[in-house]
Image: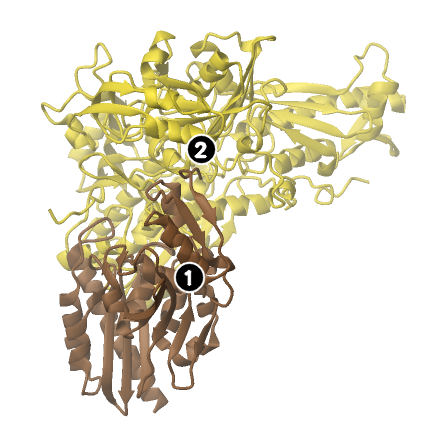
Amino acid sequence: MYPSRFNYESPKTIEEAIALLTKGNGEAKILAGGMSLIPMMKLRFASPEMLVDINNIPNLNYHRVDADGTFHIGALCRHSDLEKSSILAQHQPTLAATAPLVADPIVRNRGTFVGSVCHADPQGDWASAMIALDGMIVAQGPKGRRTIAVRDFVTGPFQNVLASNEIAIEAIIPATTGTRFGGYLKLERRIGDFATAGVAVALELSGSSVIRAGIGLTGVGSSTVNATDAAQSLVGSPLTSEAIERAADLAAQAAQPRSDHRGSAAYKKQVVRTFVARILTEINSTKTKAA
Amino acid sequence: MSLDEIKIGGMGASRRRVEDNRFIRGKGNYVDDVVLPGMLHMEILRSPLAHARIKSIDVSAAWAIPGVRLVLTGEMMAARNLAWMPTLSYDTQAVLATDKVRFQGQEVACVIADDPYIAKDGCEAIVVEYEPLKPIVNPMQALAPGAPLIRDDKENQKDNVVFDWQVGDKAATDKAFASADKVSKLELHYPRSHPSPIETCGSIADFDRSTSKLTVYMTTQAPHIIRAAVALVAELPEHMIRIISPDLGGGFGNKVPVYPGYVMSILASILLEKPVKWIEDKTGNLISTGFGRDVYLKGELALRKDGKILAVRMHTDSDHGAFFSDAQPSKFKIGLMHSAFACYDIPAAHLTARGVYTNKAPGGVAYRCSFRVTEAMFFQERMVQAAADDLGIDQAEFRRVNLVHDDDFPHRTAFGFLTDSGQYAKCLDIGLEAIGYKDFLKQKEEAKKRGRLLGIGISTMTEPLGAGNSREYDILGIKMFDSAELRVHMTGKAILRTGAKSQGQGHETTWAQIVAHELGIPADDIVVEEGDTDTAPFGMGTYASRSTPVAGAAVAMVSRKIRAKARKIAAHLLEVSEEDVEWELGRFYVRSAPTRGVTIQDCAFAAYTNMPDGLEPGLENVSYYDPPNLTWPFACYIATVEVDPQTGVWDVLKVVAVDDCGVRINPMIVEGQIMGGLTEAYAMASMQFITFDSEGNCVGSNYMDYLLPTAWETPGFELHEVVTPCPHHPIGAKGIGECATVGGPAAFVNAVMDAVKDTGVRNIDMPLLPDRVYEALTTKKDISGFPPVKTDA
């Protein structure tokens, strides 16, 4: 690959990284996993003047669950760390279902969860899961830290609210009061392809009743779609087949796909409808078996 | 006692590939690994537009970048009479565009600099002013009245037609159709695809002014053809040109044509008197180098109601892109398309073929294919299944009725080929048994009751591999023979060189096995070298599954010449007359006293130390082999699938392959070839195509959009074999490299079509992407033609 000329910096602390970004004045890019940035530089779609490689900053590669149930994912936590994580499997069914479907194994070994959310690709899988889970991003800048809900964090395709000298240092999934259920399905033409359509569902149940629901849709809008009506329709009642069908239809309505070489808009809506119904049906049968 | 042939790595030994030792250690030597002193780097500027007139090119900013040594444009090439070059199909192709650009990705300028980064910066600094013209992206547009003329550079070109060609007996075919009980019709498109070797194309040209010698390291499957082409195009003396094709990271037909990048690097090296390296990037390879396929078919079968095929009628419209640069025998304009239906006994056939220019990259390379045979066999097997369904006859039974019988060989096909051997029905039976045909049909009916869609698809075919024979096969007039040169050293070790060029086939392993079989020299004692025109005997290279049928035969024949001379030496050593000497593997002995003998190694030593009077010293020879016929392997591929009615996604349940490629030199390598071919077949059927939008933009310029299957998607394959030796090949072998790529796609497509046929849908064109299958299921209509780039506009 022959990208344009750039300067490479390798800070050892977050503060140092922020100072470099400030100096870069909007022309610097953070390099974490690089799985989207490097290909863009190769094609010279991106020509940053400076790369701030954060891989040498210690203590950013973690994921953990707090005593209260809050889940944290550090800025250098790789997709493959999550894929193999027993903590994730135990506490976060939606994320656990998503992890093995992100890109391909090579990208998962290198790419980071937080980086993927920051990249704000409408076809990114993690953003859908985070929206379904009401997840948040913690950003640090020269003036300190702030926490931003992912639904407010992403402002459009490949756009987020971070200032040019802010770094997303971790992702947070809030604690729950009920029992978590969830799933992620995606249709891709081949492993590593961007989603033709993807569906993330996160539910909290109390007994047989849904007390919280979130549905995020991948690849069917100019950014990740938050299917709030579909999710809301599930809250307060059990997962009956009528409820499942209604939610699936509402999610398909919320999808705003474009026709392209991955399929027509109508087809992508059909896939969303099918996947929402399949995930909810699967949750229902798992729940019944568990009870 | 005779040697154990398997132990010495002879015929039939699944000997490990010797070349893999260096490949898996990262020690291969590819063109990009070659570094020469003072080497400069070349980068190509490509057209962003598919069809546009070039108004101006401003290269001044590129020249201003420190480290830029040379900027070439079409105008500068034209001044040296090098702006255009001849193609392998008697057309011309622009090296660098002068008048207009004719496809997206066409070469417009190039920059030679101290390093590749600077060269790329230089390309970015060039300003080209284009006047956009209406792009033509398919044959229908190209043939429409009033279509803009793409090749206005050619004096007598008045339309976008490249050729109009026909073969077969029109009168007999028309007559058979008139008397048919039923006519089954099918329109199909074999989509444009790219061979896409992992290693892209590239070259390092090194012109030495002091010796006048031009050495070119080049990614080519046919180094000797390139040497001839360079001699003719660049008007350099042939003995001063050395083409070296080192390790190749795949070819699949992509590395047969002559590409503009090669020519530019050669001219740059001559002008600068420095080595100039050009390594194409992946996008450059995908958008500008030889595509495969892109053929539309109108097919008809005349049928008798008992299932007998009376005649076949085919018309093809093929999209050749902007320049007709197919590498194919000059006599046949649409390759060997007329090998279609060769495995069936059909009285009459007629094919008309029209080639057209479009604003796409030059197409029509034989992508793992013996010159359009892939399209031919796909069309054949889709038409066969549709005909069986139209008649309401079981698809296996329909084939059985029409397959050529074992005792009918040699068999002259309706299109004029001579097939010579096979056990077609046996292969079909083995395949049906292995897939559990009857049980599956029951299972399918059961599943249907529960709303599940199962399907089974069969593909049976024989294909012509191993061009040529010199009467009918040539490229640019050069006859398609091949060669081998064998030198046995004093200690019985040997070096073998051939005119073929391995690009993954494993020649270093298998050629040595043929020598071991013929001479009893252990395969490990034989080194194989290919690809250097200064050392290898003249040959036509490796493509179209021709290596084993042609060069492989030459290896056997040269070994036999060596054996004949060794026999004379043996008689001398044994002090008997030559007539009294018998041969067994690795050893000559006295007929009347079998314990008295000498080994082939003894003879080799004597050839340098103790030769008989009147015999030339040494033990080496060369053979040029002109095969009497093509070889005709047969294959039966069967796939079962399940289609998800809600998403159109289909999963492969099982794949069975029965291949008869005659005698197998190295069974492991043969199996690898079949699995690789089936993987490409599955790719074509399910996902792989390069499409274009209405502006002629190539959608598929990288591996995110051009989908190569990975181990995750690729189904498992169950392989079976039947061996019918080739009657004319010295060791009974037939080609195999391409069988599965050629015959495989129809098995997958037929299986999906079988699953959905209750809807009345008769065809979905490849690739069978889930959205196309879903659309067919819901609309109950055929999905035909090139998958369009759908837009909401």
The brown chain is A
Q: Is residue A127 left or right of residue B265?
A: left
Tell me the yellow chain. Answer: B
- Disc 1 residue type (three-letter): Thr
Q: Vertically, is B38 above or below A143?
A: above
Labels 1 and 2 positioned on one and the same chain? no
Seen at 28% across and 92% down, the residue is A207
Left or right: B751 as drawn, with respect to B369:
left
Question: Residue placed farthest to the front in the image?
Answer: A143
Label 2 marks which chain's residue?
A: B
Q: Secondary structure at mark 1?
A: loop
Q: Is residue B570 left or right of residue B167?
A: right
Q: Please state which of residues B442 and B360 is positioned toward the viewer in this rendering.
A: B360
Q: Residue at x 20, y 42 (%)?
A: B785
Report which quarter residue B731 is drawn in. Answer: top right
Q: Residue at x 9, y 23 (%)?
A: B146
Residue B24 vs residue A109, the one in the foreground: A109
Q: Which residue is mark 1?
A: A112
Q: Amino acid at mark 2?
A: Tyr
**Is disc 1 surrounded by few (<14), some (14 to 19) or many (20+) residues within 10 Å?**
many
Whole-percent x and y of residue B445?
Answer: 28, 67
Residue B648 in view of the camera: yes
Q: Give the SS element for disc 2.
A: helix
Residue B426 in sight from this viewpoint: no
In the picture, the disc for residue B117 is: 2
Residue A68 lies, in percent from the top left, at: 38, 86
Instruction: Tell me how far mark 1 sits from mark 2, CA to CA.
Output: 29 Å
Depth check: give the residue in front, B298 or A122: A122
